C-alpha cells in the first residue's frame, strides 16, 4: 500500500513527506519486531539446526555488498563513495 502511495505521489509530483519522528518510530518498531520474532524462533531450534543458517546469513552479508559494488561500479558509472554507500545497503 505504501509503495502505491509513493508511486502515485511521485507521478503527481507531490511533496509528500512523513515526519521524522514517525519514520524513526516505524524503523524501531520493525527492528524490534523482526528481532523478537527471530529470537523466539531461534530459541526453538538446536544449535546444529541454526549454524548453517547463521553462516549462510553471514556469507550473504559479506558477499552481496561486494558483488553489488562491482556491478554498480562497472554498469552504473557512479563515483566510488556513492557506489560503496549503495552496495552496503545490500549487506544489511
Image (spheres, rainbow, N blue to C red):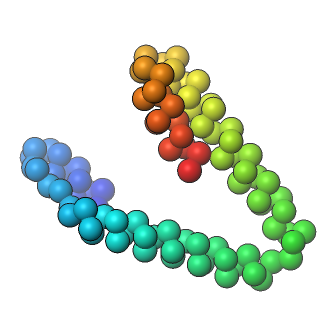
Q: Could you say which is closer to the camera, residue 35 or residue 21?
A: 21
Residue 14 lies left or right of residue 42; in this view the side is left
Q: Compared to 42, does 9 lie above or below?
A: above
The percent position of residue 33, horizontal first and vertical second, equals 51, 76
At 20% from the left and 64% from the top, the residue drawn is 19
Q: Which residue lies at the image location 25% right of the left edge and 62% below the top edge?
A: 20
Q: Tell me the quadrant of the picture where the N terminus can be found.
A: bottom left
User: In the displayed structure, does residue 40 sit left or right of residue 15?
Assistant: right
Quadrant in the picture for residue 66:
top right
Residue 1 visible to an observer of this rendering: no
In this orientation, does residue 3 appear?
A: yes
Q: Is residue 41 left or right of residue 79?
A: right
Judge whether 46 appears above or below 20 on screen. below
Give me the residue at 90% from left, 69% from top: 48
Q: Choose top left, top right, bottom left or bottom right for residue 17.
A: bottom left
- How many labels sit on residues? 0
- Residue 15 location (% of width, % of height): 11, 50
Amino acid at each position: 500500500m505504501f509503495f502505491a502511495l509513493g508511486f502515485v505521489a511521485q507521478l503527481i509530483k507531490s511533496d509528500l513527506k512523513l515526519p521524522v519522528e514517525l519514520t524513526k518510530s516505524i524503523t524501531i518498531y520493525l527492528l524490534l519486531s523482526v528481532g523478537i520474532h527471530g529470537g523466539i524462533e531461534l530459541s526453538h531450534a538446536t544449535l546444529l539446526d541454526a549454524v548453517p543458517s547463521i553462516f549462510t546469513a553471514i556469507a550473504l552479508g559479506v558477499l552481496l555488498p561486494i558483488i553489488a559494488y562491482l556491478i554498480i561500479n562497472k554498469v552504473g558509472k557512479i563515483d566510488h563513495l556513492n557506489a560503496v554507500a549503495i552496495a552496503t545497503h545490500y549487506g544489511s
